[in-house]
Image (cartoon, helix red, strand yellow):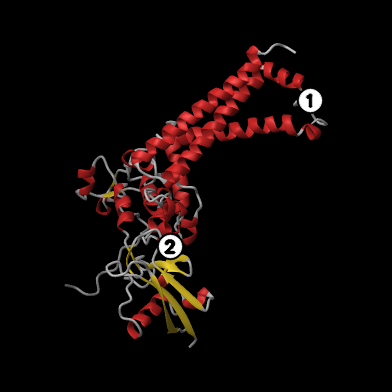
Amino acid sequence: MPLMEFVIQRFNRETDSEPRWERYQVTTHLGMTVLEALHQIQEQQDASLAWRYSCRMGICGSCAMIINGKPGLACNTQVHDLNAPIVHVQPLSNFSVVKDLVPDLTPMFEKHSSLKTYLVRQDASKTEALEGELAQSPDELMRYLQFSHCTKCGACMAACPTVAIDSAFLGPMPLAAAHRYNVDSRDEGFEARKQKVSALHGAFSCHYAAECSSVCPKGVDPARAIQLMKRDLILDLLKLRQKSAPASLAPSPSAAKPSDDIPQAPEFTVKT
Amino acid sequence: MQSRYWFWMLLSAPVILILLGWHMAIMHLEGLLGHMVSISAQPLAWEDVMARGRNVFVVTSYVLLLGAGLFHGFFGLRTILMEYWPGKAAEKVISRSCLVAGIILFSVGTYTTLTFHFFLPAP
């Protein structure tokens, strides 16, 4: 059971004027994650240590933090994979800190919601009434699928050099989310988002350092999304952007006629 | 509006690449390119400078290169400055300063180029 040293940035904005580093010895085991190590420190050494987490399995994105200088998920990072005797843990950069490893993600989510990152439809009243499903082909799905894997963890925002300089820059997560809906065949919100994403501190402020894509724990490529968005904005300016009618309602499964070569389902074994 | 500026900046890049490459080839690579194409061996000689200044194509390309270079450069400078100083007031000051500086430099450069073409006597 090798001992590893964890050096963790501590800060309480209600009592501290600036952050400080604290050292902890952690007994590690094969497969142990940084999240487990933080739990061990909290349980055995310092109950005041604060961080954010939820699912423990790389789905929710709550436990994003800087681990040995690189943004990542604590639950998704095994301590032995770091190949370092000392593990430095800090809160996500480019955000203010609430306490210890808990960043204040409010500015990111404000930018995200300002871009109308949801399906925008002209016939919203009809589609919201759930009269049916919006039809979409597999090819249309593939246009946005990888961008929909984003968990909004904020790792990309912490890695972005432009966000570090320009606090007004929308950032990789909100822009990638906007692109995800722009290219969704069910959406009609391009015009509604265009004003904001093409303005100052929008998509054109991205320098394509691509750090966002290299640190994303879900393999999303926000840098690519932003470059594709720039292309769409320029094509739209030149009136060359392909526009197609938004997806219409698909017939409900009950209205569809099953194919003849599909066998009937067996009878229920339990009768009610 | 940024889409429009960005489009012009993209367009100015190949213009700079081609015209600056051509300018560099004529002015600095005569030793190398002179063996392949007909380029003056003394590009800075008075007669050669005057001959280029009287050529409508050369003068047009110089003005075009000047405009493209200034737009590309000042747009990039504006972008960098606005990252360091975001905000509406700073945006106005930076944009207008870049615009005024660009217009002044373009005017001076164009005047100089056209002087060769229209006002100086033939050698």
Nearer to us: label 1 or label 2? 1
User: What residue is at 50 percent from the left and 77 percent from the top?
Assistant: A86
Q: Amino acid at mark 2?
A: Lys
Q: Is B33 placed above or below A32 here?
A: above
Q: Amino acid at mark 1?
A: Ser
Instruction: For mark 2, give the secondary structure.
Output: loop
Q: Residue furthest right?
A: B35
Q: Nearer the viewer, residue B118 or A203?
A: B118
Q: Is A79 placed above or below A126 here?
A: below
How packed mark 1 is, by other alpha carbons closer than 10 Å (few <14, some 14-19, many 20 or more), is some
Q: Position of residue A213 (x, y in %)?
A: 47, 57
Q: Is B96 placed above or below A111 here?
A: above
Q: Nearer the viewer, residue A132 or B12?
A: B12
**Which residue is tagged 2?**
A218
Q: Residue furthest front?
A: A17
**Which residue is tagged 1?**
B40
Q: Position of residue B37 (x, y in %)?
A: 79, 28
Q: Residue furthest bottom?
A: A1
How packed mark 2 is, by other alpha carbons closer than 10 Å (few <14, some 14-19, many 20 or more), is some
Q: Nearer the viewer, residue A184 or A206?
A: A206
Spatial separation of the CA atoms under disc 1 and disc 2: 59 Å
Mark 2, chain letter? A
Q: Nearer the viewer, residue A75 or A11?
A: A11
User: What residue is at 53 percent from the left and 76 percent from the top?
Assistant: A84
Mark 1, chain letter? B
Q: Position of residue A109 (x, y in %)?
A: 31, 55
**Left or right: A28 as drawn, with respect to B34:** left
User: What residue is at 36 percent from the left and 65 percent from the top?
Assistant: A61
User: What residue is at 62 percent from the left and 24 percent from the top?
Assistant: B61
